[in-house]
Image (cartoon, helix red, strand yellow):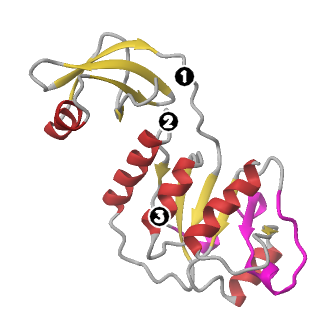
Amino acid sequence: MKNIPRIFINGNLKTGNIIPVDKSVAHYLSHVMRRNDCLVFGDGNEYNAELSGDGKSLLVGEKTNHPDPSGDITLYFAPIKRLDDMLNMATQMGVKKFVPVITERVQSNHINWERMKKIVIEAAEQSNRNSVPEITSPIKFMDLPFNDLVFADERAAYGANMPNKYKSVKCVLVGPEGGFSNTEFEILDKNGARPLSLGKTILRAELAAPIAIARLTE
């Protein structure tokens, strides 16, 4: 169903349901896309839908056979200045959950999380997902699940030998613009977190995240 608009619905989707929508959805469908039909999705499912004549609601039709391409990776990340780019790309790559982590060198402490949620919704709509990733409340570095964690390790760019991929790993950590501190590296190493090489160059944090995800899913 190429080029049919896709709209995320945060609620119980079922054939025959009538879903109230705000004016922005009606305007997008009728004036931007110039059509009344669309696809609605949420919780892993996708349905055909049609805008009502008064533009106030969507009538949910039959469920499609489109499978949800979303993955099951959890991305732990230090908030960065270009966080919208990171979340956008990672959502397109199928990340299931985003967990902000407060590290020593975090520089972006005042994130507009409501705006970030809108960004991941738009990325999910665009990328043909049937679900939108969750963004949790920030956690402290020491609360990371170290034993289950792979982390993007910039030491590979300075000659350290480490794997560039892992199988069956579902949690990955990416640091802030300034990288992890020496103390954080020691904690990661001593507590069972596994280093992941992203190559021989130092990458911007917003690029490191999608590359790390790709190394776990390719």
> Dot 3, how many residues are within 10 Å of its Cα: few (below 14), some (14-19), or many (20+)?
some
Secondary structure under the numbered disc 2 in the rendered image: loop
- Amino acid at circle 1: His
**Among numbered discs 1 and 3, the one appearing first in the sequence:** 1
* Residue situated furthest left in the rendering: 54
The crowding category of the residue bearing disc 2, from other C-alpha atoms within 10 Å (few below 14, some 14 to 19, many at least 20), is some
| Residue at x-position 38% and y-position 16% | 14
Q: Is residue 198 left or right of residue 83?
A: right
Q: Classify mark 3: helix, strand or loop.
A: helix
Marks 1 and 2 in Cβ contact (< 8 Å) = yes
Q: Amino acid at mark 2?
A: Asn
Left/right of residue 22 with respect to residue 126 in the rendered view:
left
Residue 5 appears anywhere in the view: yes
Residue 152 within the magenta-colored segment of the rendering: yes
**What residue sits right under mark 3 in the picture?**
85
Residue nearer the viewer, 168 or 123: 123
Question: Which is nearer the N-term, disc 3 or disc 2?
Answer: 3
At horizontal 75% and vertical 53% (from top left) the residue drawn is 216
Tell me if residue 120 comes above or below residue 162 in the rendering.
Answer: above
Residue 155 image point, x, y percent: 78, 82
Q: Which residues are magenta?
A: 139-165
Horizontal and vertical percent for residue 29? 23, 32
Q: Which residue is mark 2?
A: 128
Q: Position of residue 205 (x, y in %)?
A: 58, 74
Q: What whole-number distance in Å separates the C-alpha atoms at marks 1 and 2?
A: 9 Å
Look at the numbered discs 1 and 3 and tell me whether their residues touch, using CB distance below 8 Å.
Answer: no
Q: Which mark is residue 66?
A: 1
Count neighbours of disc 1 (C-alpha within 10 A) and say few if under 14, some if 14 to 19, many if 20 or more.
some
Identify the residue at the far right of this view. Answer: 161
Q: Quadrant of residue 41?
A: top left
